[in-house]
């Protein structure tokens, strides 16, 4: 019996084009100025130290850090300090009303219906927890973050690694087979299933259906 639903963001709740054509360019255009203006602030300094460690740079090499961050954006690298800094830049954008977080039209009603059934809802994305909360808190449909009791990012583990899903089950204090994972990515579904999760692939526009997994084109088609 399903007791919790954990969902991916890009390609599942949200059009991947929003991330790649709105969020990524917004951060890329502003990251140099942001780093130079805020590098001495503790949370930014900690992220930049992690950038130096990841990129093999001197901790005071600000230009090198900026170059690495821009390169990682272009490569869509799932690097935690990059996600942290992007989240801080996006926070400014959301709060200034430069954009709202895209969600597919079927998502809000499904979240409400699942919560009404007593299901526990959580997000697991390579984007930082802060970025997740911003997207859902400033979504096209208003503040949806209240539907989620937990948010997970790469600090819990990478999304194609089986141990990440064991970690999520432990955090939720549920047996793995009581959790349904929704994603558009075959390798993520494979890892979650190996950990014992039940899974369903979201086949949104542009997604190729993977063989061997239940699938749904909209949230209201997800079988619980």
Image: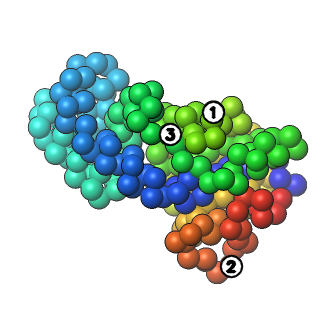
Asked whether, in this view, residue 198 is left or right of residue 158, the answer is right
Question: Of marks 1 and 3, which one's residue comes earlier in the chain?
Answer: 3
Seen as rendered, the residue at the extreme top is: 41
Q: Which residue is mark 1?
A: 143
Query: How many discs mark residues in the rendered view?
Result: 3
Report whether 170 appears left or right of 89. Answer: right
Q: Is residue 62 above or below residue 40?
A: below
Asked whether 40 or 46 is in front, the reply is 40
Tell me the residue at 27%/56% (across/down): 74
Residue at 61 percent across and 77 percent down: it is 210
Figure colour scheme: rainbow
For the point 50% across and 40% down, which residue is it? 100
Q: Is residue 10 visible?
A: yes
Q: Which mark is residue 100?
A: 3
Q: Viewer-nearest of labels 2 and 3?
A: 3
Look at the image and tell me in which quarter the C terminus lies: bottom right
Most extreme residue toward the bottom is: 211
Marks 1 and 3, how far apart in space? 10 Å
């Amino acid at each position: 019996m399903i007791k919790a639903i954990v969902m991916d963001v890009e390609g599942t709740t949200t059009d991947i084009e929003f991330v790649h054509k709105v969020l990524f360019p917004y951060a890329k255009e502003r990251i140099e100025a942001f780093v130079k203006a805020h590098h001495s602030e503790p949370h930014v300094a900690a992220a930049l130290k992690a950038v130096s460690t990841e990129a093999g740079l001197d901790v005071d090499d600000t230009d090198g850090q900026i170059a690495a961050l821009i390169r990682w954006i272009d490569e869509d690298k799932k690097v935690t300090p990059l996600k942290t800094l992007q989240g801080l830049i996006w926070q400014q954008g959301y709060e200034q009303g430069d954009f709202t977080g895209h969600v597919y039209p079927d998502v809000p009603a499904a979240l409400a219906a699942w919560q009404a059934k007593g299901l526990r809802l959580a997000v697991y994305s390579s984007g930082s927890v802060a970025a997740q909360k911003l997207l859902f808190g400033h979504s096209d449909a208003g503040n949806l973050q209240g539907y989620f009791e937990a948010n997970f990012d790469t600090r819990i583990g990478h999304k194609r690694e089986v141990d990440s899903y064991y970690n999520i089950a432990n955090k939720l204090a549920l047996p793995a087979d009581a959790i349904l994972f929704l994603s558009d990515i075959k390798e993520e579904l494979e890892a979650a299933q190996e950990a014992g999760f039940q899974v369903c692939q979201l086949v949104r526009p542009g997604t190729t259906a993977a063989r061997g997994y239940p699938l749904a084109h909209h949230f209201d088609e997800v079988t619980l």
